[in-house]
Image (spheres, coloured by chain):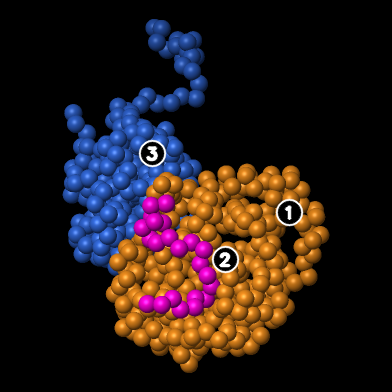
Chain colours: A orange, B blue
Amino acid sequence: MSFYQETLGYKEFDYAQFFNRVTREDIGRILYQNRLSELDYLALLSPAAEECLEEMAQRAHRLTVQHFGRVILLYTPMYLANYCVNQCVYCGFGRQNPIERQKLTLEEVAAEAKMIAATGLKHILILTGESRQHAPVSYIRDCVKVLKQYFTSISIEIYPLAEGEYKELIAAGVDGLTLYQEVYDEEVYGQLHLAGPKRDYRWRLEGPERACRAGIRTVNVGALLGLHNWRSEAFFSGLHANYLQNRYTDVEVSISPPRMRPHAGGFPPRVVIRDKNLVQYILAFRLFMPRGGITLSTRESALLRDRLLKLGITKMSAGSCTAVGGRILGEEPTGQFDISDDRDVRAMAHMLYSQGYQPVFKDWQTLE
Amino acid sequence: MQDLFHIGGKELTSRLLLGTGKYASNQMIPQIMEASGSQVVTVAMRRVDTDFEEENILNHIPGNCVLMPNTSGARNAQEAIRIARLARAAGCGDWVKIEVISDNRYLLPDNYETIKATEVLAAEGFQVFPYMSPDLMVAKELVKVGAAAVMPLGAPIGSNRGLKTKELVRILIEEIPLPIIVDAGIGRPSEAAEAMEMGAAAILVNTAVATARDPVIMARAFGMAVEAGRAAFLAGPGAARQYASASSPLTGFLRED
């Protein structure tokens, strides 16, 4: 049994029919339940629920303050390598794109780590493209050993690994995993991932669970919004998070709702996700999983991030750069995608305080 | 007569312990402590950042307060033990609140792992304050392995739902020779007072204060409630009766001779 089997249960589900039947009264009832079923969550993602966004927001805000307090954890991404054997039509690092390929040496990793650490951040998310030749697990492990001297929490956003490989990285000091399914709809997934190991839908889908079995402490999942119908993709992202939380109760599970951004290759989003849709997704997820984390990246603009803050967000990136070695190399290389909020850590901390929130720089301590 | 609270090798006058999570700014902590009169503050070691002067929570804790680092984030005894040792190494003293949680849905403590961690740390000379689900046999075991107090939850942590475990906590108060500190779930000052009237030795509160509209005023209210509850306990309230005392007692004739 894995999450894959759970998704099969919804294979023939008629979303249009379900959404047509949801009424405003249904939403009102769901809003005051203590525990939401999967279909309650889907109802909150319905067009009918768009009429109730303010009520949902009030409740989502209260639940978030109750469970997480007025605090936001800050982190930043660091790209180690952009070599990639996959051909994902929507990604700037796809092998089809003629961009300069690079990989940081361990000295460069230390130099960039030092720069980031000087801003006060203690949580780092390291990323690579999918290339076991250029960025094998042993390379990532060596990078982690360097990074441990600067950070107290290290998360990875890399190609999906086998359980034993996750164990190896956890033993080296990794405590968090981010692995986006990109698209939960299996058929659409096949259309967008044209070549490379990433074509294996199920291997990727079950990656977070393998990491949980290996003893990871935090897991972040989600769909890349813009590739398919957002309501069903948001639904499956939530179901995935809930599945993991129910089975691996000691893991801190979170979701991210990333929207597509301009990138090399220029594949336009298939579906436009409006701000209103993003808000509905964040609120519905908060009500479905009151203790689930919600991570908001710099894919969103400063203005919008400041407004989304109070709706249920628990973690935000700051001082982001999506290019390999972007912080230490003089000229700006091509990033995975363009960021929309280029505020540095100090500016983010200032913004949080001014909104009545405490920026948290450290929320875990690697245990030797 | 002064009612002193002897605990973990210290002598305190306040019986309210405060948490430090969930505040909009660590700079509020001194005001909160002062308004409440609390002398003990618990801090999650996972959040302590000794490299960052401005944001280091330890720099915001008044010098006259007793620091009780906690092992928040520990998923088993091993992790709790490591965190406690890190706390001591960081100069946070010998007090430690053991918090072992392996269920992120309800955040209920893992009593079994908590006993294991308590035993190891008490043997290492820590004053151990285990947070637990109220269970008499577990509490007895905690006494045996050297805990400094027993800290049963009133309701799930952060829930503000009040003293839902009242009857189980009452049994601990009656049977356990250590101070019983009700930790977690207390949402209102009246509930803190109720626990104190019952004979709890102290109360630990975080969410109820930190998420109040005005945390400073709420801290003060909790300080007063804990004091009132304690005074009522010491005063020995008259027994509650189900019926009013009858003015024409049925057995009055026995006194008529």
Please report, as a chain letter, where disc 2 is located. Answer: A
Residue B241 is one of the magenta-drawn residues: no
Please give the name of the residue rendered at 38% of the width and 35% of the height, measured from the top-left corner: B218
Residue B133 in view here = no
**Is B137 placed left or right of A223 in the picture?**
left
The residue mark sitting in front, 2 or 1, is 2
What kind of element bears circle 2? loop
Please give the name of the residue rendered at 24% of the width and 42% of the height, measured from the top-left corner: B39
Residue nearest the viewer, comparing B60 with B115: B60
The residue mark sitting in front, 3 or 1, is 1
Q: Which residue is mark 1?
A: A47
CA gap, disc 2 and disc 3: 35 Å
Q: Please check whether the numbered discs 2 and 3 fall on a single chain.
A: no
CA gap, disc 3 and disc 1: 38 Å
What kind of element bears circle 1? helix
Please give the name of the residue rendered at 34% of the width and 81% of the height, measured from the top-left corner: A108
Amino acid found under the numbered disc labelled 3: Pro
Please report, as a chain letter, where disc 3 is located. Answer: B
Q: Which residue is mark 3?
A: B215
